[in-house]
Amino acid sequence: MTVDATLVAPPAGGTLRIGPHTVTPPVVLAPMAGITNAPFRTLCREFSGGKGLFVSEMITTRALVERNEKTMQLIHFDPTETPRSIQLYGVDPATVGRAVRMIVDEDLADHIDLNFGCPVPKVTRKGGGSALPFKRNLLRAILREAVGNSGDLPVTIKMRKGIDDDHLTYLDAGRIAVEEGVTAVALHGRTAAQHYGGTADWDAIARLKEHVPEIPVLGNGDIWCAEDAIRMMRATGCDGVVVGRGCLGRPWLFGDLVAAFEDGGRPPATPDFGRVAVVMRRHAELLGLWLGDESRGVIDFRKHVPWYTKGFSVGSELRRALATASSLAELDDLLGKLDQDQPWPAHADGPRGRTAPGKRVVLPDGWLNDPYEVAALGEEAEGDSSGG
């Protein structure tokens, strides 16, 4: 998947317009549940010098309008974040409309993204996530309510190719998005059936760009390094890229992306473990400050440890200890026991996070009978999982 960076030059342009917002370079942090909270976005923005667009983790519209306590914390933005970008997930047009109106009236964000890409079974079996665009009229109704209540805020969407190779929806969904006033559309080049397995279909991104030339198209899938982003834009003609799993345990990837777009694609210096350990410590500290409790922050950070340490010589005993750390002092002690001069492992590049192969997509009974039926989905369809 990677190429010699000296052979890849940035595509012409390098500026993405999302409504009134200019995104330079055209790089977007993908919403990821439990990951792209305010602390992680802060790290990514620090490495990028504030350049790019960093989207919140997914917020369910029902929880937002009901002012769920956890949800209200998730929509917190640091004062330095601009534009403030929030991703919503909803299945009921009226509820989506109320959530968007609440964001506008209370000045909660500057940009709204809608998630139609979640492949998680507990969501698709209720007709939500990546299953929903198959119901064309339901998709249209949701987009109409969102755009109609958004005022001056731009509304974008993120989706997958479809349910499976026999039920592709992305071209129809892209056209509906244009017709309903959506500002931009992002496509993950996989079906729901693929989950995160196999290889992302960049050709589908190119086809979508040709199909909806009226609005920006962003590509998502298999961007593991800055050179991949450049290659995707050159190969597909897309207007920007959305980076998800590639930045897990590597928030500095956004600095690499800025360098690739602005410095002629020159490969950045890779960090040794000492530099990685500093970032790990800061990540855990930021989580503690955000959660209001140091121990909770370190415990929440545990899931990031395997991504940060991938490929480094850590040892099974230290790995277990890092997985149970509950204070910054304990984390400092454990990280200090590791060889700080370890160079960046070559095999640490490439796929990160979930790479499970696809499975049969679980859908509501009769879901595929009529793509134009306006389905009525219950609130149980609004799961708290994300993943486009």
Image: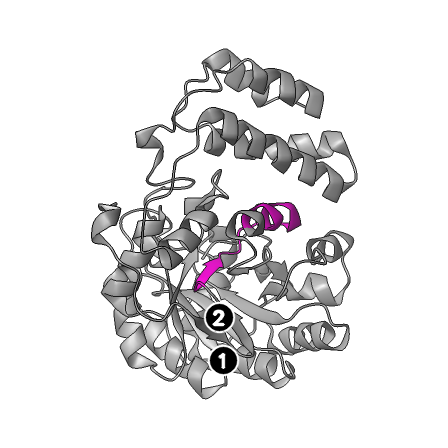
Q: Amino acid at mark 1?
A: Val
Q: Residue 298, how many percent across, how many down?
A: 67, 30
Q: Position of residue 43 (x, y in %)?
A: 58, 45
Q: Amino acid at mark 2?
A: Ile
For this orientation, the residue located farthest to the front is 263
Q: Nearer the viewer, residue 113 or 143?
A: 113
Q: Is residue 374 visible?
A: no
Classify mark 1: helix, strand or loop: loop
Q: CA distance from mark 2 to mark 1?
A: 7 Å
In the image, residue 365 sits, relative to residue 297, either above or below, namely below
Q: Residue at x 60, y 77 (%)?
A: 93
Q: Can residue 130 be seen by looking at this rendering? A: yes
Mark drawn on residue 250 = none
Task: Check if mark 2's residue and mark 1's residue have beta carbons within 8 Å.
Answer: yes
The residue nearer to you, when weighing 116 against 374, is: 116
Front-most of residues 110 and 90:
110
Task: Report helix, strand or loop for mark 2.
Answer: strand
Find the magenta span and give its range: 25-44
Residue behind mark 2: 157
What residue does disc 1 label?
182
Structure colour scheme:
one colour
The residue positioned 68% from the left and 35% from the top of the image is 285
Residue 60 falls in image quadrant: bottom right
Mark 1 crowdedness (10 Å alpha carbons): few <14, some 14-19, many ≥20: many
Q: Position of residue 121 (x, y in %)?
A: 46, 52
Residue 94 lies in magenta, yes or no? no
Compared across the picture, whether 44 is left or right of 314 comes to: right
Which of disc 1 and disc 2 is earlier in sequence?
Answer: 2
Which residue appears at 46% of the width and 27% of the height? 309
- Determine if the magenta segment contains residue 41: yes
| Whether residue 275 is situated above or below residue 36 in the rendered picture | above
Screen quadrant of the C terminus: bottom left
